[in-house]
Image (cartoon, rainbow, N blue to C red):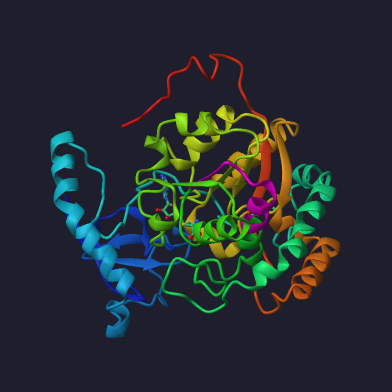
Amino acid sequence: MALTLLVDADEPALGWGPSGRWGTRDHWFTERYCFYTVGPVALTSDRPHHEQCAPRPNQRLGLYARPVGRWLDRKRLMYAARRARDLPRHALIAALLGRRRAEFPDASFYLPLDYPTSSCNSPRWGHGRPNHPFIEPLLAAHVDTYRDVLALLPQYGQDLAAIDRAPRPDSEPYWDNGFWATSGLDAAAIYCLLRSRQPRRYLELGSGQSTKFAARAKRDGGLDTKIISIDPEPREDIDAICDLTLRRPVESAPLSYFEQLEPGDVVFLDGSHRLFMNNDVSTFYLDVLPRLVPGVLVGVHDIYLPEDYGPETVNRYYTEAYMLAAMLLAGPDRIRPVLASHWVCLRPDLSKLLDETWASIGLGGISAYGSAFWFEPNLQAPGPSRESGRPVETA
Ligand SMILES: C[S@@+](CC[C@H](N)C(=O)[O-])C[C@H]1O[C@@H](n2cnc3c(N)ncnc32)[C@H](O)[C@@H]1O
């Protein structure tokens, strides 16, 4: 198979891909670019791939010299070193298994598709169009519960305001962090819900800044909460503030971790956001949720219901929310919303209440927006009892 050099308008040469194929690549874990290979070079863009059936006359194409400073970014070097270290092992495993997965040492994964992901790849609900007509009333039915959660903010307001704004080099949380700078409400919700519920366990799937806020809540509240992190590569160095770490993907974690949870415990998922075979999302919604006893509080990040994912995320191909939406629609009594943060921010009366509360506790200037969806699942499926079933551990 001929290989083609991938060229991106905003990056130097990115890697190699099979010629004449569609694909996508992850850009530094946050952006997803699409490419179409043409002869010896591949065009990439942040446009949805179906819009890019052929190179356009105005296509920006060419190598771009990035300032050296950005290449020497500590995190970039750290990931590069980690990937380089893992490469021989991956190559050996791939050779042994005869797998032809397109995996590259810089964490790029190419996904050739035989059909476009969508004929238009634009939000279907909300963002200028009507919200989902059946999910909105389901969320609206729990407004009083959302108000109760927002009422926790002033209760812990002094402690929230005591959290530093400026970046810190240690494992203390801070508001102006790169990833959650626009999600102040989500950080505050983790903090307040842990303080008020005082769970025995906080089980986090996908760790980083969120873990720091959880650990701060534990310390400020003198809680006995055990912080458990399941994530092969947390975004921050948070091992020291966890009581237990499982540095492997959710899909290979023993399900006994979830079966042990008790009413009052808290689970927070902020992982890949994409539903695929045997990944964190399919495992969580189909294997974890039905095993949770009633009374466990669950939070999932980046949920915009009753809107679709926003136009700014179309190239990330997030799909997790559709799974949650289907569950809500199939049995509203099975998923009891506790805080639909994005919807709270959409609704004028609640967002006004939030803004006023936020300012009154001295958090002005920090984003009061949130997109975490908190709920109590009641999905325990009939069938083999939880105790009798052996935990399924996948390789
Ligand atoms: C969006 S980041 C969120 C991190 C964290 N919640 C924070 O506040 O910074 C996603 C995290 O999910 C992790 N992740 C991706 N796939 C995963 C999987 N299958 N199992 C567990 N964690 C996964 C990544 O390693 C990454 O640390």
Report whether 246 appears left or right of 15.
right
Residue 229 position within the rendered picture, expressed as x and y whole percent measured from the top left: 44, 48
* Residue at 50% over, 57% down: 211
Query: Which residue is nearer to you in this view: 300 or 212?
Result: 212
Query: Which residue is nearer to you in this view: 276 or 265?
Result: 265
Q: How many marks?
A: 0
Would you say residue 28 sits in the magenta stretch?
A: no
Mark yes or no: residue 371 visible: no
Would you say residue 201 sits in the magenta stretch?
A: yes
Residue 105 position within the rendered picture, expressed as x and y whole percent measured from the top left: 23, 57
Report whether 137 appears left or right of 245.
right
Mark yes or no: residue 247 visible: yes
Residue 231 position within the rendered picture, expressed as x and y whole percent measured from the top left: 40, 48
Q: Quadrant of the C terminus?
A: top left
Report whether 229 appears left or right of 80.
right
Q: In the rendered image of this protein, does residue 303 appear above or below residue 79?
A: above
The part of the chain drawn in magenta is 190-204
* Residue at 62% over, 41% down: 324
Q: In the rendered image of this protein, does residue 282 appear above or below residue 186?
A: above
* Residue at 65% over, 37% down: 326
Examine the image and state in which quarter residue 23 appears. bottom left
Residue farthest toward the front in the current orientation of the protein: 222
* Residue at 26% over, 49% down: 102
Query: Which residue is nearer to you in this view: 17 or 173?
Result: 173
Residue 394 position within the rendered picture, expressed as x and y whole percent measured from the top left: 35, 30
